[in-house]
Amino acid sequence: MKKWLGNLLLGLVLLCGIALFSYPAVSNWINTRIAFNVIGTYQEQMEQLSDEEIESRKAAAKEYNESLSNGRSYVPYGDEERSSIDLLDPGEMLGYLEIPKISVNLPIYEGTSAAVLQKGVGHLINTSLPVGGKGSHVALSAHRGLPAAKLFTDLDKLEEGDYFYVYAMDETLAYQVDKIQVIDPYIGDELDIEKDRDYVTLITCTPLGVNSHRLLVRGVRVAYEQKTADELDEMYQAQPDIRWYLVALMAACILGIFFEMYRVRKRANHEKRK
């Protein structure tokens, strides 16, 4: 009886260990599925818009971007004119972001509130809207190190020359990383607009877990090539997480323990009947 109870307690301890150990992987998988569903809904909404409606929204967004480029720098905490989500999307999203190298596919939302940054990428107010064009500088921010979702956790793995993509309405905008820097929390002229450049800067906290500084990864607009995008998707397609193998091994151990418990109990009952 004592042996049976001991095996039961061991099995329960291992089961709790598996639950704690696998939580980040499972939770991230769930959040990834949710993000893909949200992106799918966005794509369907865009397909329902007429060409005239899409062009009208893009024209309004570019007009807004031009107003930003006329001598105004990024204002981090001001209450000045802010971008309007209605310029791009009839729903909640501005578009979505893909970073093939770190397997990121995330919706882009307006603002950087806590609610936004828990579920995707936030667009910094007072920066250009993500519709492309010279004289624009889009700033996109996301958390890293969250236990429930990866988001920008691996942003520090990007190097100069890597690609990422912004999808807005009916366009795919390609950007190539041209500058990476770590700065103090206050962001200043790093987000200034250059008249002849089309930039997107990705922002997150660093070092991981300390969050005392900001990591800025800037990309400059390049021509979109479907072949390059497909090759990157294939090259960096998500690989099985080693933790799943460990979880499977631990699950096998637990099954072995319960099987042994069953054998011990069966043997004990057999001896009682004697």
Image: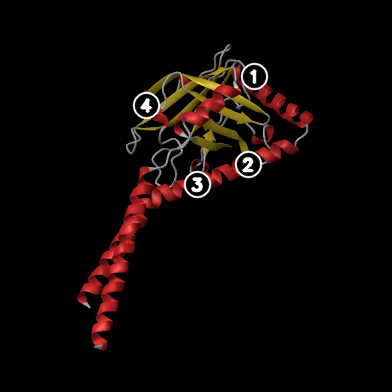
Q: Residue tagged by mark 1?
A: 66
Q: Residue tagged by mark 4?
A: 184
* Residue displayed at 55% across by 47% down: 34
Q: What type is the residue that disc 1 sits on?
A: Glu
Q: Is residue 44 visible?
A: yes
Q: Position of residue 124 (x, y in %)?
A: 53, 31
Q: Position of residue 106 (x, y in %)?
A: 53, 37
Mark 2, Cα crowd under 10 Å, few <14 / some 14-19 / many 20+, is: few
Disc 2 vs disc 1: Cβ atoms closer than 8 Å? no
Mark 4, Cα crowd under 10 Å, few <14 / some 14-19 / many 20+, is: few
* Residue displayed at 70% across by 36% down: 46
- The Cα–Cα distance between marks 4 and 3, rounded to whole angstroms, is 30 Å
Q: What type is the residue that disc 3 sits on?
A: Asn
Front disc: 2 or 1: 2
- The Cα–Cα distance between marks 4 and 1, rounded to whole angstroms, is 29 Å
Q: SS at mark 1?
A: helix
Q: Which of marks 1 and 4 precedes in the sequence?
A: 1
- The Cα–Cα distance between marks 2 and 4, rounded to whole angstroms, is 37 Å
Q: Which of marks 4 and 2 precedes in the sequence?
A: 2
Up-down relation of residue 138 to residue 23 (above or below) = above
